[in-house]
Amino acid sequence: MSKSLHRRLLDEILSGSGIWPAVPAIVVLIVVAVIPFCILLSLGFSEITVARGVIVSQEFSLRYLLTALADPLYHTTFQRSITLALLTTFVCVLLGFPVAYLFLIGKPWVRRLILVLTIAPILTSGIVRTYAWIVILGGRGVVNSVLIDLGLISAPLRIINTQWAVVIGMVQVHLPIMILPLIAVMSRHDRRLDEASANLGASRLGTLWNVVLPLSIGGVGTGAALVFTLSYTTFVVPQLLGGGNYLNAATMIYEQVVYSLEWSKGAVTALILMSTCLFFLLVFAWLTNLGTRWTRVAQR
């Protein structure tokens, strides 16, 4: 019986059937995600003593969590982070949907051009793109130089080191993440529906609003969830374009862990960040499910 079991397991491994093909991915996920999360959880609910970078003692405590939940600085920081992420997501949807719609109705060369222009920025480091915005938005940057040369302003505008600079950088960095899911969904769009809508007397705008947009809700929800997650947890863009004074949740964690060496505070802040991010992801999933419910009813 044991030999038969071993032989069957060996056959499954060699044939790639059952759960065995997923075992390497599961192991990697446990090593890089589950174990670090458990360590983070233990630090956030512990009173630890550190000596020379080594944890000497560790005792269970809720002090850091209760302090964080009652601290007005945490409320302000997370409110700013959520507002920034929602604003970035909203702007990415507004800018990404027309690009995806142009991909839908465009000729083959237009589609190839859109794909190249969308994927090319992803191949460049986000840090490089963010530094480029420092050059563009700086006091002597391209934007201020053009406005001064045109006579629209007499002195350089203060764009860099403001929230608007952070929003501009975030939108540029994360816009491809919004466009690609929309393109993937719109690529399956049946153009005969547009023709039927036009034959029934609908304008192009009416077809876009009543046919294309409802069928693209899945892509909008997926892209919005991805952009929100990246914007909510980002560190580089606010740190560089905010001038080091723009405090969001990610920069707070960095300062607590790296500068202050307050590991328990950093762990608690990270747990709050992960929990609130998961909450908003569930909201996005619920809204997407609500928006696509009619498609499942129509298929029955």
Image (spheres, rainbow, N blue to C red):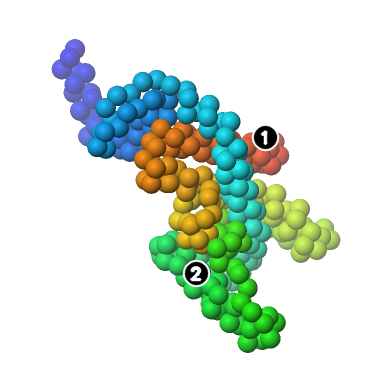
Residue type at tag 1 = Arg
Q: Residue at x 36, y 20 (%)?
A: 59
Q: Residue at x 63, y 73 (%)?
A: 157
Query: Which of 94/105 is in front?
Result: 94
Q: Residue at x 38, y 46 (%)?
A: 259
State the mark number for residue 134.
Answer: 2
Pair 2/1: label in front: 2
Residue at the right extreme, as displayed = 201
Q: Would residue 101 be visible to someone looking at this image?
A: no
Q: Position of residue 167 (x, y in %)?
A: 59, 59
Element assignment for label 1: loop
Q: Is residue 244 above or below residue 28?
A: below
Quadrant showing the C terminus: top right
Query: Which of 11/185 is in front?
Result: 185
Q: Residues within 10 Å of mark 2 (few under 14, many from 20)?
A: many
State the mark number for residue 300.
Answer: 1
Q: Position of residue 61 (x, y in %)?
A: 43, 21
Q: Residue at x 35, y 27 (%)?
A: 48
